[in-house]
Image (cartoon, rainbow, N blue to C red):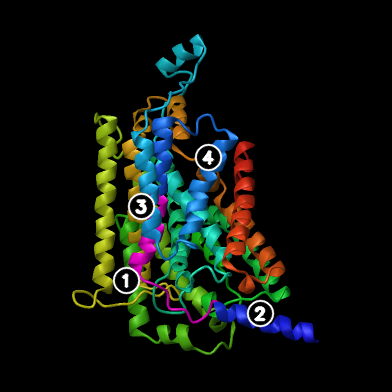
Amino acid sequence: MANATSAHSYKQLKEAFVSNLSGGSVSEIAQVCAVAPVVALLWSVLQARQSFFKPYTPLAFVVDFLLNVGALLLSVTLYSGAPVLLGALLVAAAAFVYVLPPGRRRKPKLPPAAQTKTSTGSAAGSLGVLSTKPFLTNYRGNMMALTCICILAVDFRLFPRRFAKVETWGTSLMDMGVGSFVFSAGIVASRPVLKERADGGRGTPLATRLLRSVRHSLPLLALGLIRLLSVKGLDYAEHVSEYGVHWNFFFTLGFLPPFVALFQSALRFIPSYAGLAILLGVLYQVVLESTELKAFILAGPRTDLLSMNREGIFSFWGYLAIFLAGQDTGMLVLPRSLNPGSSATPSSQRRKLLYTMVAWSLVWVALYFFCTDYAWGAGLTVSRRIANLPYVLWVVAFNTLLLTSFCVVDTLFFPAFYNARDSRAEKEAYDTATSRVLRAYNRNGLAVFLLANLLTGLVNMTVPTLDVGPVPTVGILVGYMAVVTAATVGLDVYNISIKL
C-alpha cells in the first residue's frame, strides 16, 4: 500500500514538473538552435579542408557523434545558460582547423571502362529533376537528433524548465521542436507532387490521393493507439492539457496526409501551398477570436470525447498550416533547378536558390512580427497548445531561417554537389558533404523517433529522473543517445529504410 501511494505521489510530482510552465524568449531559443549550423560549419571545415570523415573510420564516427549529437546535448544541458559561448568555441575550433595546411584529397579510382562511360553519362546515369541536397539532410538530421535528446532530457532537472513545453501562452524550445517536426515532414511530402508534375501528369484524382494518404496514415494512427494504451496501461505520467486525455502527437501526424490530400484540390484556386497555409492559419485565428472556441479549448469542461481531446483536435488545424508551409518550402529546395531547361551555370543556380530562400525567410519573419508586435501589428501571443496563427508563423519563419543557414554553409564548402554532371558524381559529392550520423537520422527519422520514445519510457520506468544530479544526467543522456545513434547508423550501414 505504501509503495502504491509512493508511486502515485511520484507520478504527480513528474506531472507537476512539466506543468504550468511559461517558456523563454524567442532570442534564447534561436541562440540554442544556432549551435546546429555552427556545428555544421566546423564539420564542413574538417571535411572540406582535411577530408577528416573520408574514409569513415571508427574515430571519424566518434567525432561525428560528438559534434552532431554531443554539441546539441551540451546546448540544452551544461551550456543551456551560455549557448553563445558554446557557439563561439565551435567557431574558434573551425577557424583553427581552417588555417591548418589542407590534408590530402582522396579521389575515387574507377576502372578505365567505367571512367569512359561516366564521362559520357551512360554508366553513371543522368541527373533527375529532383535532388536531396546536403543542407536539407543536415537540417532534418539535426532536427531529429535534437528532438530525441529533448524528449528524455525534459524529465531531468538539468534540462531548464524554460525549454519545456509551455502550458498555454509563450514560446519554448520544445514547442518549436513539435512544429519543426511537422514542418520537416511537409518538406519531404512535396516530393511526390514534384515527381507528378515532372512526369507531365495533370493531377491525381482526389479519390486516389485519399486512398494513398490513408495508407500512409494507418501506421501512424496505429502507433498513436499503441502509445495511448501503453500510457494508460502503465499509469505513465502524462500532461493532459498538452493534447487531451486520449490524443497524442502520433494521431496529429496520422491525420495530416488525408487532410493534405483534400486541401490539395484548393491549389486550383490558390496559387501556392504557402498561400494555402496562410489562408488556413488566418481563418483558424479568426474563428478563435470571434467565437467561443478559444475559451472552450483553454477552459472548457471535459465531458465527452470531443471536449476531452479538444487541444489535439483543434490544434490540428495549426499543424496542418505548418505542414502546408513546409510543402511550399519543399517545392523550392527539392527541385534540382529553380528554372529547368535554363542555360544558367550551376553556380548561378546555387546562388539563386540561396537568395530565394533568404527572401522567403524574410517574408515569414515579417509576417510573424506583424502578427505579434504590439506597436505595429496585431499584438497576438504565441500558443502551441492551440497552435494559433502566431505559433504557425513563428515555426515557419524559424525553420526557413535555420534551413537557409545550413544552405549558406553548404554553398560555401561543397559546390561540387551542385556542379555534378551525372548521378555518380552527385552521389559522391553528397556523401562527402553530409555527416554519416545525420544522414542516418534523416533516412529513418520516424522509426528513430519511435525508438527514442520507447527508450525514454524505459528510462523513466527504471530511473527516478527527478532525483538524478547533473553529472549522472549527462551520463545517462550520452548513453541513451549513443544507443539511438548506433542503431540509426547501423540501419544506414546495412542499407535498411523503415517506412512508417
Q: What element carries label 1?
A: helix
Q: Provide residue 260's location: percent of width, then percent of height.
A: 45, 59
Q: Mark 1 points at which residue?
A: 282
Q: Quadrant of residue 391?
A: bottom left
Q: Name the residue under label 4.
A: 436
Span shown in magenta:
18-38
Q: What residue type is labelled 3?
A: Ala
Dot 3 or dot 4: first in sequence order is: 3
Dot 1 or dot 3: first in sequence order is: 3
Q: Mark 3 points at which residue?
A: 88
Q: Which part of the image, by quadrant, shows the N terminus?
A: bottom right
Q: Is mark 4 on a helix, strand or loop?
A: helix
Dot 4 or dot 1: first in sequence order is: 1
Which residue sits at x=60%, y=69%?
469
Task: Name the side, left or right, on which 459 lies relative to 306.
Answer: right
Dot in front, 4 or 1? 4
Measured along the vertical axis of the image, is residue 404 above or below residue 120?
Answer: below
Which residue sits at x=59%, y=54%?
481
Q: How dense is the environment of label 4, judged by Cα within 10 Å: few (below 14), some, or many (20 and up)?
A: many
User: Distance from label 3 to label 4 (Cα)?
Assistant: 24 Å
For residue 11, the mark is 2
Say which of 347 and 339 sits in front.
Answer: 347
Dot in front, 1 or 3? 3
Dot 1 or dot 2: first in sequence order is: 2
Contact, mark 1 vs mark 3 (Cβ under 8 Å): no
Q: What element carries label 3?
A: helix
Task: Name the side, left or right, on which 437 lies relative to 94.
Answer: right
Dot 2 or dot 4: first in sequence order is: 2
Contact, mark 2 vs mark 3 (Cβ under 8 Å): no
User: Distance from label 2 to label 4 (Cα)?
Assistant: 39 Å
